[in-house]
Image (cartoon, helix red, strand yellow):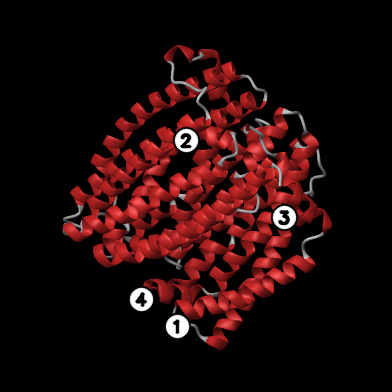
Amino acid sequence: MSTAKRRFVANVSTNVLYLALTALFGLWYTPYLLQHLGVAAYGFVPLAASITSYMSILTTGLNSAIGRFLTIDLVKGDRKAANRTFNTALFGAASLLVILLCVLAVTATIAPSVLNVPQGLETDVRWLLLFVGVAFLVVVLGSCFAVPSFSYNRFDLQNWVKSVRLFALAGLTVGVFAILRPQLWQIGATTLAAALVSLGGDLILWRKLAPELTVRLRDRDRSQFRDLMSMSSWVVVNQVGTLLFVNIDLIVVNMIFGAEMGGRYGSVLQLPILMRSLATAISVVLAPIVIARYAKNDMAGIVRVSCKAVKFMGLGMALPIGLLCGLARPILTVWLGSSFQDLDLLLIILSAHLIVNLAVLPLFQVQVSTNRVRWPGIASLVMGVLNLGLAVAWAKWGSWGAVSVAAAGAVVLTAKNAVFTPLYNAYILRLRWWTFLPSMLAGVIGTAAVALAAYGLAHLLVPHNWLGLMGVSAVVTMGYGLGAYVLAIDHSDRQLVKSLGTFGLKV
């Protein structure tokens, strides 16, 4: 195989391996913390991550901009411009981190007064938020140095760094709990330590992949910073709306239904989060490919990749999402215990809509590559505010309890991504308005088929342990794989898969 094709295969395979590792880690980590901390205390672990993620409103916008501009500079072979972009973004991010550190300190201080915190956990919650927040800032700083691995399409190396971080977090957590009495603040401390390990890995990759990029204050360019901020400002608006979709539910549940329900909700939420991580890891592989095509003004290549990517994403995600929906009750029983099996409807509502909302992820890469991010940002913000209002209203005046919060997010987010996102991308690529809709439908049909098959098979075999769940999943997977290959994938799809490696950035 050519170097580009080998690299594409390495990126995809290491993504799959890393996601498998993440899944195993999540399946172990959540019940492990529940056992050592209790449900109410554990609820603040995902809640801390959720609150901290609001700081990504600014940093995600800047990272998206630097990824785009730096990749274009490298594709064109302009190393001087690449150095200018790198340093402009790095020192800009450093300034933002100082501001966010101050915001973080205030947030950690007042959190127990705002959230529903059980008596005696106030100090632990403050330290947890502070440590997790600083860990996030460390990861953001590391992401600036990790941009070359994105630009050069070396996700395989980045996956090794992230894997080491997971192992560090697991080992440190077990070690601390073995030596000290388990407490909530220790989770924050181990998270920060693992983030520092990850930063070391990012620095090593930066020097290996892009030795020509050096940290020099004089290479900052104020005019380029304005260009970066011009693009990132609309990405920020989009990010605000996105966070109001995917990160507001835990806060609403905690404040309205209490810490105990927040812990139960947060535990179940880990599986849909895993689905989001899986889809993001797949779609991000396409980002440098699309940006490289745009840098070479190859709009036909962008159209070809994006049209098929939506179909592949839907077909690929249909299997895990369908299995979560069809096996919701036995999965919760085996994983977290019988006391969680009554949350099967919650898991289904949190998961089912993802088949639409994750299938369109490749289209977001097109928006960033072409710098058409204004209207997506406005749409996300408007719909995010609507989601917050609907979640609070249904939670207070509905009869579904915490399920109503999940239902609000599912309805509003699906309305946005089933209508606005595919139509807007068809517009900016000058395609017919319905171009992406049939590709999305393939995933929906696949999810329904997998869910029904898994549900029916589970009622026949009644899995009571992991072995039983794996057996049911294996049977459904084989049937779905054969059906999708024969019925849903045509010759042009197979040809695109074979040629994807040639779309990459060659270095």
Looking at the image, the residue that sits furthest to the front is 1
* Circle 4 Cα neighbour tier, 10 Å, few/some/many (<14 / 14–19 / ≥20): few
The label on residue 311 is 3
Whole-number angstrom distance, CA of label 1 to CA of label 4: 14 Å
Q: Pointer 1: what residue?
A: 464
Query: Disc 4 on helix, strand or loop?
Result: helix
* Circle 2 Cα neighbour tier, 10 Å, few/some/many (<14 / 14–19 / ≥20): many
Residue at screen point 41% across, 39% down:
201
Which mark's residue is nearer the viewer, 3 or 2?
Answer: 2
Whole-number angstrom distance, CA of label 1 to CA of label 3: 34 Å
Query: Disc 3 on helix, strand or loop?
Result: helix
Query: Disc 1 on helix, strand or loop?
Result: loop
In front: 437, or 30?
Answer: 30
Q: Earlier in the sequence, mark 4 or mark 3?
A: 3
Q: Earlier in the sequence, mark 3 or mark 2?
A: 2
**Which amino acid is tagged 3?**
Lys
User: Where does the image place residue 304, in percent across and percent down from the top left?
Assistant: 78, 44
Q: Pointer 4: what residue?
A: 339
User: Where does the image place residue 205, in percent across and percent down from the top left?
Assistant: 47, 35
Q: Are marks 2 and 4 in contact (CB under 8 Å)?
A: no
In front: 145, or 48?
Answer: 145
Q: Pointer 2: what residue?
A: 205
Which mark's residue is nearer the viewer, 1 or 4?
Answer: 1
Left or right: residue 116 versus residue 72 is: left
Q: Earlier in the sequence, mark 1 or mark 3?
A: 3
